[in-house]
């Protein structure tokens, strides 16, 4: 039996080096050819992507504010969609939390409630009877299916039609319709204030990319 064969010699030399505290580092071809990772381009790419989604969110929110004033887009819904998009694209570390999105959802629902009830309270303020109030309410419900213009014009037509059905003169019915229109304008101002509040909340809650 050959004790001093080559494998035993390697084991003995390894044990002596370990006892002496020596460190042996064997380089492999994979170590010699492995490229060094560069962090610079990755960080730059990450910043570019973050700035891109910030720009997209701000542009969409600006469109939402315009849609609040002009009956073209559901303004607060567009602003909420921009915030959700920002959160989904950048994640929790670089965007708002889901609690903030929940608060923005409540403000969106509040804006629709104000828009829905503005015409009814305006008609009541100008002396509309229950016929006019019910007409304004039904007009608002029907107007939902015709987007924002329907929400503005529907309650006015409903209030006038309700007063006429209730036996009021055209002048009284027109007064109720005028009150409904003023209530809708007041609701529009309230929605605009909510839209700006949503944008400001988003800007305060989201970490800045700079």
Image (cartoon, grey):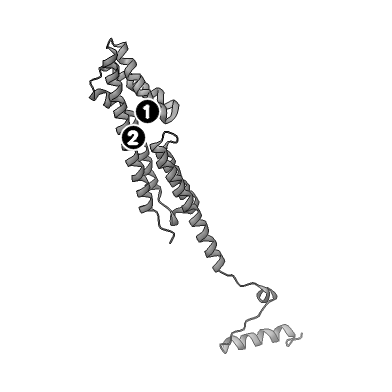
Is the residue 187 above or below the residue 162 in the image? below
Q: Give the residue pinned by disc 1.
A: 152
Residue 176 locus on image (x, y percent)? 28, 20
Q: Regarding mark 2 in the picture, which secondary structure is present there? A: helix
Q: Quadrant of residue 194?
A: top left
Which numbered disc covers residue 132? none
Q: Quadrant of the N terminus?
A: bottom right
Residue 139 locus on image (x, y percent)? 37, 21
Residue 130 locus on image (x, y percent)? 26, 17
Q: Give the residue pinned by disc 2.
A: 188
Alpha carbon distance from label 2 to label 1: 9 Å
Q: Residues within 10 Å of mark 1 (few under 14, many from 20)?
A: many
Residue shown at 73% from the left, 88% from the top: 4
Residue shown at 35% from the left, 19% from the top: 158
88 left or right, relative to 121: right
Nearer to us in this view, 54 or 103: 54
Q: Regarding mark 1 in the picture, which secondary structure is present there? A: helix
Is the residue 164 above or below the residue 113 in the image? above
Could you tell which of marks 2 and 1 lies nearer the N-terminus?
1
- Taking the view exactly as shown, the residue that stands out farthest to the front is 171
**Number of numbered tags placed on the structure image:** 2
Residue 80 locus on image (x, y percent)? 42, 42
Is the residue 142 above or below the residue 67 in the image? above
Q: Are marks 2 and 1 in contact (CB under 8 Å)?
A: yes
Q: Quadrant of residue 106?
A: top left
- Taking the view exactly as shown, the residue that stands out farthest to the right is 1
34 left or right, relative to 139: right
Residue shown at 27% from the left, 15% from the top: 171
Q: Residues within 10 Å of mark 2 (few under 14, many from 20)?
A: many
Is the residue 176 above or below the residue 18 in the image? above
Q: Quadrant of the C terminus?
A: bottom left
């Amino acid at each position: 039996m050959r004790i001093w064969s080559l494998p035993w010699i390697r084991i003995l030399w390894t044990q002596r080096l370990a006892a002496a505290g020596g460190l042996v580092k064997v380089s492999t071809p994979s170590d010699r050819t492995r490229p060094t990772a560069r962090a610079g381009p990755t960080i730059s790419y990450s910043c570019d992507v973050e700035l891109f989604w910030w720009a997209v969110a701000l542009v969409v929110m600006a469109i939402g504010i315009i849609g609040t004033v002009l009956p073209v887009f559901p303004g607060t819904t567009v602003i909420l969609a921009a915030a959700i998009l920002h959160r989904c694209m950048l994640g929790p570390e670089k965007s708002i939390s889901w609690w903030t999105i929940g608060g923005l959802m409540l403000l969106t629902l509040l804006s629709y409630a104000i828009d829905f009830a503005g015409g009814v309270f305006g008609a009541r303020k100008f002396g509309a009877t229950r016929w006019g109030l019910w007409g304004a309410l039904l007009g608002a419900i029907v107007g939902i299916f015709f987007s924002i213009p329907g929400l503005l014009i529907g309650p006015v037509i409903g209030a006038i039609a309700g007063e006429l059905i209730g036996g009021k003169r055209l002048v009284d019915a027109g007064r109720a319709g005028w009150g409904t229109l003023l209530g809708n304008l007041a609701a529009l101002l309230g929605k605009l204030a909510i839209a700006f509040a949503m944008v400001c909340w988003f800007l305060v809650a989201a970490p800045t990319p700079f």
